[in-house]
Amino acid sequence: MDAIITAGGTPKPGKPLYEYTQGKPKAFLEINGKPLVQYALDAIGEAEHIERVVLVSVDEDSGVECKKPLAFVPHQGGMVENILAGTEKVLELNPDAEHVLIGVSDTPTYMPEMIDWAINEALKTHHDAYYYLVLRDVFEKRYPDSNRTYVWMKDVEVCGGTLGILATKLMTSDVDFWEKITAGRKSVWKQGLTFGISNLIKVLLRRLSVEQATTVLEERMGISGRAIFSPYAELAFDVDEDHELEYLRQLMTESG
């Protein structure tokens, strides 16, 4: 399977992480002298099930490298456009690609075996979209002081993963639809509205299970999807806030 890594995102003055980036892309924040994006490329580049990697929003002269064949796509102006352009590049390089792994550049916590696990789990079934969830107790056991935000469901509390696997055919869907989805990616309320207002109320009342939520999404999106619970908290940790960066810097410095 081919992978797309999106590396867009430059914090603006007054926003989280601007104090650290000072107008530079978040992907190049460093932990132990290595940019976040290089951590992601190292892990995905060593995953057995990854054939090639498309890196979006980073120039070829940036100095980053990968053990797998690496193609670069310039920044397209937004997350949706970046994913679409990345998919176009994947299909240019591999016209037979049916699915792509989509990851982010602002996490240093991926490990090769976790990437391979995610792909192996997805390949057990035939769906258009696979999204990964981490249970609250799993995440807090690994990162007890992360101050993470969780979604309360009927049966569990979860946080969303930073990886996904999508069918390439989905990338030709209506762009306005994808804009609405990605606009709500960081907002529990906006994510809830994707389900419809009645189902949002059920979520808030802990009345909607993960299985029910998946069914609702399939009905509203017209695609087949599957939620996969990850035993790896690392697959749900990206750096969006100052305290998350400092927390990971401390953990990774202590671990060497």
Image (spheres, grey):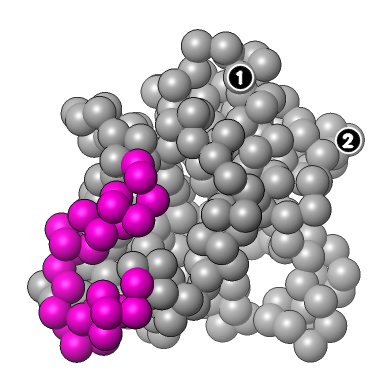
Callout 1 amino acid: Leu
Q: How many marks?
A: 2
Specify few, some or many for label 1: CA neighbours under 10 Å numbering under 14, 14-19, or 20 or more: some
Amino acid type at circle 2 is Asp
Q: Is residue 199 above or below residue 60?
A: below
Secondary element at image label 1 = helix
Q: Nearer the viewer, mark 2 or mark 1?
A: 1
Mark 1, residue position: 91
Please tell me whether residue 255 belongs to the stretch shown in magenta.
Answer: no
- Residue at image location 41% in from the left, 39% down from the top: 165
Q: What residue span does the magenta drawing correspond to?
A: 196-223
Q: Quadrant of residue 234?
A: bottom left
Q: In the displayed structure, does residue 174 sit left or right of residue 70?
A: left
**Neighbours of disc 2 within 10 Å: few (<14), some (14-19), many (20+):** few
Q: Nearer the viewer, residue 19 or 56?
A: 56
| Residue in front for this viewpoint, 183 or 50 | 183
Query: Residue at horizontal 50%, vertical 11%?
Result: 96
Residue 195 position (above or below residue 101): below
Q: Is residue 161 visible in this depiction of the protein?
A: yes
Looking at the image, is 30 positioned above or below residue 226?
below
Q: Which residue is mark 2?
A: 61
* Quadrant assignment, res 171: top right
Real-space Cα separation, disc 2 to disc 1, in angstroms: 24 Å
**Which residue shows up at 42% across the image and 45% down it?**
164
